[in-house]
Amino acid sequence: MLLGGSERLGRRAIYNWSNADSFVSQGIAVFCFDSPGTGKSKGNRWGRTHKERTEDALAAIRAIEKREDINRDLIGLYGGSEGGSIVFRATSLSKNIAYGITISAPAVPNYQHINFLVKSLSTNSGLKGVQIEKFVTFNHLVFDLVQNYSTINYDELEKTVAAWNDVGWSQILSLVQKRTDRNREATKESFITQAQRWNGEEWFRGNKMLMEFWEHLAKRLGMDLADLGIDFNEQDIARSYVEFLSAVVTKIGSDPSRDEDPVSFLKEIECPMLCIYGERDQGINAAESAGIIRKVFVDTRHNDFVVKIFPGAGHQLNITEGKRKYRHKDFEKFILDWVRKD
């Protein structure tokens, strides 16, 4: 069974994304379904929680098990990116899954994943030093407020912000740290004020990559962009940026299932697991996630797992050469050999 990532693809796109024909050619049946709110699947396109997506996957397994042409003892889950996170959850909850395959799946809580993504995008956008610190800090504060619980060491952050000698930053930090309903409007205004300052600076206003990031972050937070009435149009991005921040602070509730530590699920997995990463993944800290998975499986005495990092590959194992983008040449065979080894 194939599970798409946060991009919410239709079933045909997921099928092609995973090179599913290679499985079929080896006598392995493939099942995939439209992501929520895509194609014929109903639901909120971006608001489906990790818990709900896991329930979808387990329901699909129960449906497949009823088919006479399927060996119910050999049903495996294959998920990329956010789909890989769902594989971690589902394989920890069900004994009816024969094996799991994850591609580029973060093994850290969502706020750590978002922080890495922001830092990576900032660096690739040409920001340096304090600019990166401020951009990452700003997004972490937004995320912390949205989730309505603290993921920040405020004692350490106060020292960092104090060194910037900026009253605006000190005000934002103070308001978020207090997190009361009475100061919520003031907090929102502080975020918007800082956003407007950035909109007036060339390093931000002229940076397409940072502009596009906001839509990406909105999706990762499970936001339904249509419901929020936000138009991420490049020609009107400054207004949209401010609207985005306002919407995050005032309209978006948390998804507790999205921020549960993946380690809690990894500890419960008993079936064989193949976890693959790309060395140059700019959306996930591949080395960190691979290290966490290895440690958990060794500590829990899991006796059948493989964690592999492909050199030179990025997210979803893509290789980029100039304008060309393609899958790592050894990727497909590696997975097939692992699945067929027994």
Image (cartoon, helix red, strand yellow):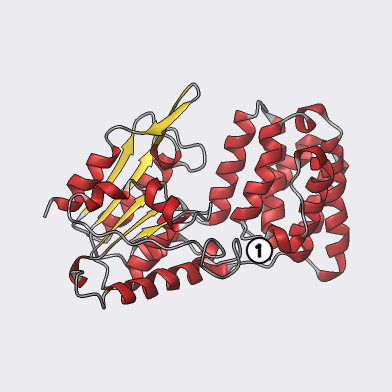
Quarter residue 98 falls in: bottom left
Locate the C terminus by quadrant. Answer: bottom left
The N terminus - image quarter: bottom left
In this view of the protein, can residue 177 be seen by the observer? no
The foreground one among 39 and 238 is 39
Q: Could you tell me residue 215's position as x and y percent?
A: 67, 48
What is the residue that sits farthest to the top in this orientation? 322
Q: Position of residue 263 (x, y in %)?
A: 40, 60
Q: Percent from the top left, x then y, of residue 134?
A: 72, 38
Q: State the image quarter where residue 144 is shown.
A: bottom right
Q: Is residue 159 visible?
A: yes
Residue 222, compared with residue 103, is above or below; it is below
Secondary structure found at label 1: helix
Q: Which residue position holds label 1? A: 147
325 horizontally vs 335: left or right: right
- Residue 163 position, x and y percent, is 76, 36
Nearer to the camera, 175 or 80: 80
Between 123 and 171, the one nearer to me in the picture: 123
- Residue 89 lies, with reference to residue 244, above or below; the image says below
